[in-house]
Image: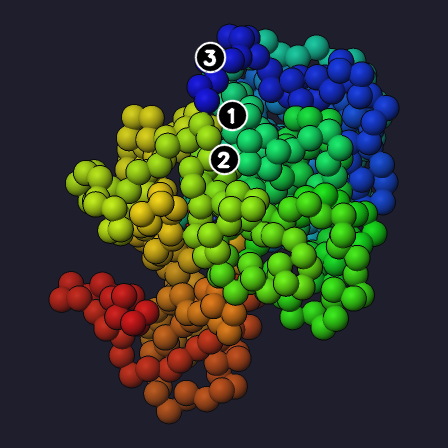
Amino acid sequence: MIAADRLPHEFNVASHFVDGNVAAGRGARTAFICDGRTLTYADVQDLANRTGNALRALGVRMEDRVLVLCLDAPEFLGAFWGAMKIGAVPIPVNTLMRAADYLYFLNDSRAKVAVISAPLLAEAGPVLGQAPFLEHVLVAGGDAGRHRSFEDAIARAPSALAPAPTSRDDVAFWLYSSGSTGFPKGAVHLQHDMIVCVETYAKQVLGIRESDRVYSAAKLFFAYGLGNAGYFPMSVGAEAVLSPHRPTPDGVFEILARHRPTIFFGVPTLYAAMLAVKDAERRFDLSSLRVCVSAGEALPDEIYTRWKERFGVEIIDGIGTTEILHIFLSNRAGQVRPGSSGLPVPGYEAVIVDDTGQPVAQGEIGNLRVKGDSTMASYWNKHEKTKETLYGPWIQTGDKYWQDADGYFWYAGRADDMLKVGGIWVSPVEVETTLIRHPAVLEAAVVGAEDEGRLIKPKAYVVLKDAGAAKPALADELKAFVKDKIAPYKYPRWIEFVPELPKTATGKIQRFKLRA
Ligand code: 3UK
């Protein structure tokens, strides 16, 4: 789908999703169930309008960036839609990161305002004073400290707001994506991108409809969760269940049993953890589900099979990226080829090419390239990275793939050293540089290793300054050290002490040798 064929030149995507539902007569219908509290579509409009007006009152203008460091709670919806309605650019960021990451996001984006959920202030608060472009902070859902209260600001703001006259190709929002080296890259998404994902994957693969109720364990700040529980249900006037809490297996089962969604979105690690819950199929009634979705990393075929046996519902695996915004290769309900990523989603084309860009023969492994109109315009302020990634209308995802004789796509690893752990990016280089900060460590190399469920987790090979210090207690100390310094989900699950690391003549670590 090409957006220009469907959308008028002047198009404000927030108005489309937020005002559109009220205009369609759905004002009184439930849009979100937030931790037990119901928001109707009229409530969402009121929240977005007031937040847009509050941001404007703080000096936010069209194209200004607004950092959204929010839990899955009303303030996320207000900030995301309200900013876009005034033509400003919300940037949802990962709530599991550390203060140094937030300072980078603030300075790279030059966000003028940050909207922060109160429980996240403990981590982000100390660096806010170091961001020279940040002018105001709105804190939601708790003590605002020395900042402004989000709730006070929106209570004072008017509830009427006309949409800014953006074009279908204006910048709408950014999402940061981690790279193997260097800092995260801001993927710049346009007003039409979410519409493309709705018209292709959401409607044609999921068949999402007004009677659906969705629940996504992946949070709204991920491109995956943003579609799943944000704009997909809003595209048809359906309902979404939001939870600000960490998705534990038991907690997720409880939400599924209590709120009875029709579609559930998870990641392989979570499905594996849920399958490890004894008697879950007898303790929790999952009969409301018509389909489950998995993305973020490849879903092992055993998980698909065991889930279907125990819960009687299929998991459809599909691959998406932050840069393409949502899923572009996917299995289809009733036609799943377990272990594969399925077929191109209608509206997307996919090819597998060699390192010179020529298509490979069927069955051979190569680089995945995808064409579709939800792809980012560029990476913010990273021109070289943009050119390495975009090829005219095509984008190279960094994944290795092969295609079977029936056209199904099979994941065959990354072209770079990046790891997907629980569906979230981990850069081995970042873990290595953190390990090296420990006084006992001389060198470290981090690679992906499979856990008992065939899912990838970081494993560190460590050379100590004093080889005699290699003890299990030191391994535990190093794990805790990494957890303390960078986002905790990145810590190495195993540490192996080695006398030296395999290196090239020029001294580069040969991670492929450690993987083998
Ligand atoms: C990997 C997969 C095999 C792959 C995402 C759904 O994951 C999402 O976006 P990210 O930018 O990561 C993208 C990378 O993750 N990957 C994702 N899904 C699969 N590998 N099988 C899969 N099913 O390396 C890809 O390049 O975090 C997922 C919707 C939107 C998304 N942005």
Distance (Cα) linking label 1 and label 2: 10 Å
Q: Position of residue 218 (x, y in %)?
A: 62, 48
The picture quadrant where one finds residue 166 is top right
Asked if residue 505 can be seen in this view, the reply is yes
Judging from the image, what secondary structure is the residue with disc 3 in?
Answer: helix
Labels 3 and 2: the sequence-earlier one: 3
Location of mark 2 (residue): 325
467 or 306: nearer the viewer:
306
Mark nearer the viewer, 3 or 2: 3
Labels 3 and 1: the sequence-earlier one: 3
Which residue, as the protein is rendered here, is positioned at the far left?
505
132 or 183: nearer the viewer:
183
Quick check: 371 left or right of 197?
A: left
Q: Amino acid at mark 1?
A: Val
How are the colours assigned in the image? rainbow
Cβ of disc 1 within 8 Å of ligand 1? no
Residue 130 to residue 180: above or below: above
Q: Amino acid at mark 2?
A: Leu
Quick check: 141 left or right of 474?
A: right
Location of mark 1 (residue): 196
Tell me the residue at 64%/46% (across/down): 291
Tell me the residue at 75%/33% (across/down): 211
Tell me the residue at 44%/48% (across/down): 341
Q: Quadrant of the C terminus?
A: bottom left
Q: Position of residue 480 (x, y in %)?
A: 55, 72
Distance (Cα) linking label 3 and label 2: 20 Å
For the residues bearing labels 1 and 2, Cβ distance under 8 angstroms = yes
Distance (Cα) linking label 3 and label 1: 11 Å
Numbered label attached to residue 5: 3
